[in-house]
Image: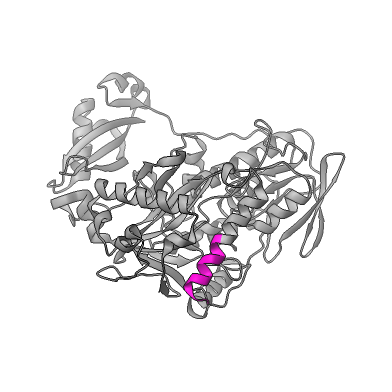
Amino acid sequence: MLLVRNIRLPLSCADPDAEATAKALRILRVPPRRTADTGVAKLSVDARHGKPVLVYTIAVTLRDEGEESALAGASPCVCFTRAPHFEFPVGQTPLAHRPVVVGLGPAGLFAALLLARSGYRPLVLERGPDLTRRIQAVERFEKTGELDENANIQFGEGGAGTFSDGKLTTRVGDPLCAFVTQAFLAHGAPADIAWRQKPHVGTDLLRGIIRSIRGEIESLGGEVRFDTALTGLHSRNGVLTGIETTAGDIPCETLILAVGHSARDTFSMLHRAALPLECKPFSVGFRAEHLQTEIEKSLYHAAAGHPSLPRGEYQLSQHVGGGRCVYTFCMCPGGTVCAAASEAGGVVTNGMSLHARDGRNANAAVVVSVDGRDFDNDPAKAVAFQRKLEQAAFRAGGGNYLAPAETVGSFLQGKGQLALGQVQPTYPRGVTPCDLGTLLPPELSGALREGLTAFGRKMAAYRAPDAVLTGLETRTSSPVRLLRDGETLQCDALQGLYPCGEGAGYAGGIMTAAVDGVRCAAALMRQSAPPVV
């Protein structure tokens, strides 16, 4: 396959896909009759100079594929590539018991998928319910404030990423990203995730994909047990021999631990078991909401609203005093702020959007980095820090999981007011005016004010005083990391235990978590053959 990059077209093109393909063939000097297939490999928008242009990469496959490598030098923008082929070596010694995967978020889901496809018949344990019951629990919480601590936006089939924008963007150049993308496509993801610069699925479509992948796992001999939490580990001479769960003990010598970033009781169990945990940097702050139209005016200027342009999204960062960074995270175009609590008496915010991204508001986390120096390098103190902030937000909201909120102009001046204008908050439980700065340590509040001021210099929408801040955002990533060997990926202190994904501190987002799940499953497979039926 040939890739022809950097084909730039104005928005005025009547059929930009066709024109980009024709231009790619002209660059290659190949007539259409010699091609077997052409298509968009990547599409992005360059809006840096105030006049957006479409930037294409076109994939071309020739009828005679043997000719392709010779054409790779036709232009500096042409390269020859092969479709990725994945092989996963298998060890010699069969397992005595089927492997166990704990957690059915992206990491656990894709670990189980590879194991099932390879004949290992994994047993998957998920503390929460299946998606149907999980969605019902989330909707009930949003309407009534009745929180189920095992069925919410953090826990249940699909993990925290299920209630998100469904972003598949990553800076990780791992070839396994293609494995994950292929699986998503095979289970019904939109075709454009294969070529969009910033692919996303949307929370509505993601739910069906997750159910479909689970169905493949089960059809290949895997088993999923919902409402079953890990509570303990059994070992002998530093080797895993079994696990304790809320449904009883299970013998196993291999366990992929993919519990997600909010499994605080699991972190405590690991700490009591004297396994090697360390503090991991994470970030805290709040959700910022703007009108989506104002975001697009800031990005696309006079071209805002053009049908060829994607919904506007952004990523901003600013280094501030004290060696910290303030940045935006998990930006959801046309989305809503969601109620993401998983513990009684704590308020947590997050963001999500549907595939269409057609809501009135855009939202993004605006957060400041924290690390081990803030918690005496004690993982237990890092978790306690998160919990303390969430409980403070609960009290400031007035109870019943209302969230504290403040307009940006008020926050920058420390007034504690919610002077609503065009932007109406979307947090489903309702909001309460609050001085958000008082809910965070002064150094962090000051850093966030400095960061927001800098964002206003970079993007016009951030100068709008009626943008709404809703707090607090505390679950940006896991506060702890369970150390593992760089080659075997097993826990340094317990052979057979594979710390995996975001909860173990090795991923940040759907794609990287899924890739780490595949990576851990592949490492397990290199060590051992499937169990004998």
Above or below, 46 against 165 in this view is: above
Whether residue 464 is visible: yes
User: In screen coordinates, is 37 left or right of 269?
Assistant: left
User: What is the span of residues highlighted in magenta in the rendered image?
Assistant: 389-399
- The residue closer to the viewer here, 158 or 409, is 409
Residue at the image position 73 percent from the left and 35 percent from the top = 527
Locate residue 405, reporting x and y percent: 40, 67
Above or below, 397 against 275 in this view is: below
- The residue closer to the viewer here, 262 or 205, is 262
User: In screen coordinates, is 87 left or right of 437?
Assistant: right
Residue at the image position 51 percent from the left and 44 percent from the top = 512
Instruction: Tell me, yes or no, whether the highlighted magenta stretch contains residue 391.
Output: yes
Locate residue 403, reporting x and y percent: 46, 70
Whether residue 356 is visible: no
Q: Extreme bottom residue here?
A: 144
- The residue closer to the viewer here, 131 or 160, is 160
Q: Extreme right residue here?
A: 236
Locate residue 394, reporting x and y percent: 52, 70
Question: Magenta residues: mostly which secondary structure?
Answer: helix
What colouring does the structure picture have?
one colour
Locate residue 202, reporting x and y percent: 41, 59
Residue at the image position 38 percent from the left and 65 percent from the top = 336
Tally the marks.
0
Instruction: Tell me, yes or no, whether the highlighted magenta stretch contains residue 443.
Output: no
User: In screen coordinates, is 280 left or right of 50?
Assistant: right
Residue at the image position 29 percent from the left and 36 percent from the top = 57
Location of residue 376 (image quadrant): top right
Q: Quadrant of the N terminus?
A: top left
